């Protein structure tokens, strides 16, 4: 399939991501509703110009800082995230010894097993998820299930492309919730402690790079000056300015 997309196609990246999600549905890694979630993300990425906007760079710094300063960080991985950023997440996990936890909205044991195997093939530090022996208070089964060793015990949780309800429930547990969500208006974006308004494909390698670069002292400083509400407002204003410029009527 990849061979059908010309190397110089202006929308190559976007088309490859689409292929990855569609192939993920065929191979049982992605639930079919993942196609819809991806489409919503694509629309917002178009508004951003398919590039990391300046406010997202600040949120990426804050995300890196909070993962560096965490005592028990964990990264939650769902189907879309796995097929789009599995390799990059495994590399971050390995380098910074952060466990991954496969945790999915439409939970079936079969898809869980497939995703755990898929992620293990990238050689991360650890993959949790099959041993989902704890529950997140305030959510119905099976969405509340998580690992007592992973999300349940974590202080900082990176949950890209998360549902609003779950993000809220994790915040209510007192966790620092870091998310990647192209939609600055989603409930997840609004609920999270740190929201990176960017494509997960660009954001994960960027977080990894900043984690390699920041000292603990710098990380404290970055976190001390980050306000998620202000950062979300800056993302919305960035889109507004971009649309004004594109309209030719600014
Ligand atoms: P919420 O429940 O938070 O209000 P939602 O119901 O609109 O959000 P979900 O389907 O729960 O959306 O979650 C998918 C979210 O992930 C959407 O906000 C979508 O914009 C975002 N998204 C999809 N693909 C990507 C991607 N590649 N990178 C970053 N964000 C993405
Ligand atoms: Mg939702």
Image: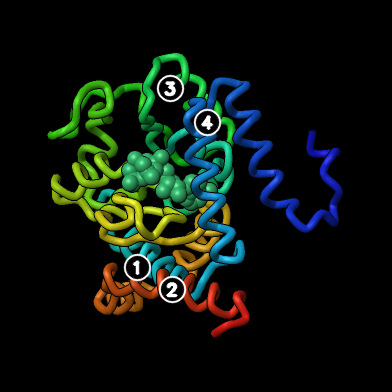
**What whole-number distance in Å separates the C-alpha atoms at marks 3 and 2?**
34 Å
Q: Give the residue at the far bottom of this rendering.
A: 250
**17 lies left or right of 106:** right
Which badge, 3 or 2, is on the more N-terminal residue? 2
Report the front residue among 226 and 99.
226
Which disc, if any, is residue 232? 1
Q: Mark 3 or mark 2, which is nearer to you?
A: 2
Residue 65 left/right relative to 149: right
Q: Nearer the viewer, residue 172 or 42?
A: 42
Q: Residue at x 59, y 59 (%)?
A: 46
Indicate which disc, 4 or 3, sits on the residue closer to the N terminus. 3
Q: CA distance from mark 2 to mark 1?
A: 8 Å
Q: Earlier in the sequence, mark 2 or mark 4?
A: 2
Packing grade of label 4 (10 A; few <14, some 14-19, many >=20) is: some
SS at badge 1: helix
Residue with the mark numbered 3? 112
Q: Which mark is residue 55?
A: 2
Check if mark 2's residue and mark 4's residue have beta carbons within 8 Å. Answer: no
Residue annotated with mark 4: 120
């Amino acid at each position: 399939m990849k061979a059908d997309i010309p190397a110089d196609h202006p929308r190559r990246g976007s088309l490859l991501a689409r292929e990855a999600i569609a192939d993920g549905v065929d191979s049982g890694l992605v639930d079919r509703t993942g196609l819809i979630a991806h489409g919503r993300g694509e629309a917002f990425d178009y508004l951003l110009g398919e590039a990391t906007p300046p406010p997202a760079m600040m949120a990426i710094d804050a995300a890196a800082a909070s993962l560096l300063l965490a005592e028990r960080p964990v990264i939650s991985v769902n189907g879309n995230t796995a097929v789009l950023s599995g390799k990059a997440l495994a590399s971050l996990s390995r380098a910074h010894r952060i466990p991954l936890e496969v945790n999915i909205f439409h939970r079936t044991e079969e898809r869980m097993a497939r995703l755990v195997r898929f992620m293990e093939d990238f050689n991360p530090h650890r993959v949790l998820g099959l041993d989902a022996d704890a529950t997140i208070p305030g959510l119905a089964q099976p969405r509340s299930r998580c690992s007592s060793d992973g999300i349940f015990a974590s202080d900082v949780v990176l949950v890209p492309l998360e549902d609003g309800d779950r993000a809220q429930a994790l915040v209510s547990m007192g966790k620092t919730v870091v998310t990647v969500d192209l939609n600055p208006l989603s409930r997840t974006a609004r609920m999270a402690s740190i929201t990176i308004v960017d494509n997960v494909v660009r954001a994960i390698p960027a977080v990894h790079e900043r984690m390699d670069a920041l000292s603990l002292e710098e990380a404290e400083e970055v976190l001390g000056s980050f306000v998620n509400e202000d950062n979300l407002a800056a993302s919305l204003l960035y889109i507004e300015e971009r649309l004004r410029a594109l309209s030719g009527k600014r």
